[in-house]
Image (cartoon, coloured by chain):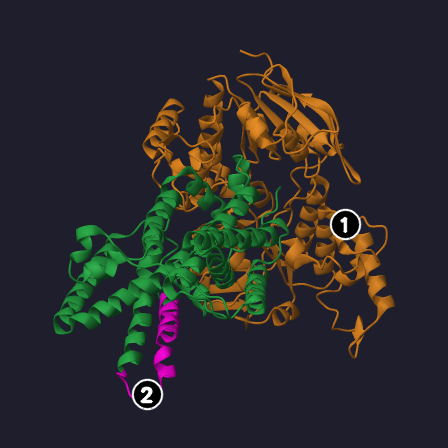
Amino acid sequence: MGQVMKPQQRQLLYAGLTVMLVVIWIFYSANGPQTTAVLAGTVRAATLLALGAMCGMIGERSGVVNIGIEGQFLLSAFAAFTIASMTGSLFMGTVAGIGMGLMMGWLLAAMAVGLKVDQIIAGTVLNIAALGLTSFFYDRSRSLGMGKYTNIDLGPLADIPLVGTVFFSRPPLTYLTMALLVVVHVALFRSVWGMRTRAIGEHPGAADTVGIDVLRLRYLNVTLAGGLAGLGGAYLALEAVGTFSRAMSGGRGFLALAVMIFGRRTPFGAYAAALFFGFTTALQNQFQLNNTFDIPPQFVGMLPFVVTIVVVALSGLVGSMRDPAALGQNYEKG
Amino acid sequence: MSEVLLAAENVTKQFPGVLANDDVSIRLRPGRILALLGENGAGKSTLVNVLFGMYRPDSGQVVIKDETVDLHGPDDAISRGIGMVHQHFQLVPPMRVVENIVLGDEPTKRGLVDLDEARNRVVELSERYGLEIDPDALVEDLPVGMQQRVEILKALYRNADVLIMDEPTGVLTPQEADHLLGVLRELTETGLGIVFITHKLREVLAIADDIVVLRNGKVVGETTPSQTSESGLAEMMVGRSVVLQVEKSVATPGDVVLKVNELEVNDDRGQIALDGLNFEVRAGEILGVAGVEGNGQRELVEAITGLRHPSVGVMEIDGEQLTSGSPRQITKKGVAHIPEDREKHGVVAVYSVAENSILNRYHRRPFSIRGILRRDVIRGHAQDVVDEFDVRTPNVLVPASSLSGGNKQKLIVGREFSDEIKLLIAAQPTRGIDIGAIEFIHRRILEQRDKGTAVLLVSAELDEILGLSDRIAVLYDGKIMDVIDAQDADREKIGLLMAGITD
């Protein structure tokens, strides 16, 4: 399974981490504020990707492809923003975002699992519907009167140089996401639910013959996973940006799928990948702010996407990742 | 202990157009092995599915441990102690043995799967029944025989006292199969009852305590091994006397027709499937290729018929180099092909019998002239094939999909044999068809041999290989272990080679 690493892979991982820490330390000594800004930006960008990747991996581990994460982000962001603005409560807005994500997850399950629509088409329906609905109902005059979620310092931890700012002085949904990484990891690899989930994604027939209701579990998982994307939407509107704008998810739902694949469909792997992609985003922001390169900003803005293409292509070349065997296939009893 | 472990009483099950089970009764007692014998379509699977709760009978009832029960699904059957080992294993390959065994009935500790406890239980079970296994091995790394053991442990873990084994020896070498029969015999000593489904007569005689023979959905005979013989059982299965072993004259091999030199072929995943094969087939002889399925047989047949291109090596047909030739070039040399998968490569299901009868030469005279098909000629030809090869069909215009498996196969054989041929490639030519059709096709293959055709026969049925071949090549892991003359061959010898063992 995905969580098992070969000794060489482990060594490679540790070597990579060491090099990274040394590089960060060198940069931090050279230019403290800017390094801190880039790394804080990295964590900020990674949160949304990690939530999307977890949504995707729960679906895919159960055998259902979800390419509708982009739409789930967008419509949930819209719901979260609108409800928060109406009620004046960020908490209510967050609940609304999660609720919308669950509803869209349920809709995807109804199409892809219940009606056995092609999974890619079902996901595309979500994306198109979300873009259309949010554009139509978007009300420019709305705003968050009370402002967005603010940073919470975790006591003395927040005072550690660099690390404190980057990890322990964050807004609440970021902390929640970090906690969810652990929860989803334990659930996927240690719980009864997780074992059955992995089984129905690999060999639904085998699960069926031991009395596991494959369709019901897929329905449940795709719906619940939608809640994670919904939280991502709420994070986007209420914590990262503080407002809603048209098509504000900006392709990050798709980027989350790349993150999921690169992270081998494991929560921690996905978070590492999310940090990596987040880093390219943060770096690109910093370049644009400082006018580091004398080229049009649009080109600098391409950085994360170019890196995505290169990395996904490379990971394909390495070829160490294997999809769940029943991925994308509808299950017929019998 | 109960008198009757598992029974079907007057079970009738109707499907649209077929009476799959007609008033069927069977009865399994503790510590006994009941063999359920019948041809494809005789109603074995339906009956087993009724016993396992997959189907509900239209009338009649299922009795488990002296108690009439109403099964609503497999879980119902499992919870009452019925375990089933499916013909196609129901295991999750990338998961560990222990995870596969406890899946669906996992021991837990504080809400999480308690793998230590699971491992203990598996080890305890495997010791109690003498079924040694490494609980932490990944299922995908295990050989087929071991995977089957995991399936049996899976049933025992759920406290099964009845095991239903569906065609369990199909994927095993003869030695592995014998070993399995021994294991099953030992299991019955603990009071377990076993329903053993098969079409292999020899196994039935070797293992069964009671034998029930099904034909056309009805029980046509109940007997015991001491009261019957292979031919007796075959007669019950088919309803008339059959010849199990076709008469065969001594071969008179002529010139080399097919010559294969250092052939290397990759499988679909790009892995080496055939690793430097050398052999030749002469006119007027049958070279049988034995081996457990998946050892390169499919790739071999596809390489020779032009469906797959070898990466290295040379193939010559009748002296002409045809490595990587197209199927049409190869067919033109007089090569006939009875494909392994008749639904996929043998017939076009939606085409009529007539159209199917010319699939290999529709583009030639007299069947078409300047690109226009000549219907009358084609129908006439199809009628000849149907008459000569005993294809049971109302007429030649019905779609091929309406024929039974045996009749489809006879249609394919008829099409391939209705031209002058030099080389016949027959892959699993009698898979899943009735004994009558098997006998017919065997005769026709021998007839071709006697007319001077070179025959390459690839089959997973060792009896078929032993019955027809003049020489036998054993394929293991993409290599030919040995080629032996048929008169020196026996099951034992070939079985060892099939497992990759040479002395």
Chain coloured orange: B
Q: What is the x, y in percent for residue B97? A: 39, 38
The residue where tag 1 is placed is: B403
Give the vertical position of B161 relative to A114 (above or below).
Answer: above
Q: For this view, does B146 lie left or right of residue A99?
A: left
**Residue B320 occupies which quadrant of the picture?**
bottom right
Task: Give amino acid for label 2.
Answer: Ile
Q: Which residues are magenta?
A: A291-316
Estimate how packed mark 2 is, as few (under 14), some (14 to 19) or many (20 or more) residues with alpha carbons within 10 Å: few
Q: Residue furthest left?
A: A29
Disc 2 designates what residue?
Answer: A295
Q: Is residue B442 above or below residue B336?
A: above
State the image quarter where residue B87 is shown.
top right
Residue B331 visible: yes
The residue closer to the viewer here, A144 or B258, is A144
Name the tint of chain A in the rendering.
Answer: green
Q: CA distance from mark 1 to mark 2?
A: 71 Å
Chain under label 2? A
Quarter holding the C terminus of chain A is: top right
Answer with left or right where residue B284 lies relative to residue A95. Answer: right
What is the quadrant of residue B149 in the picture?
A: top left
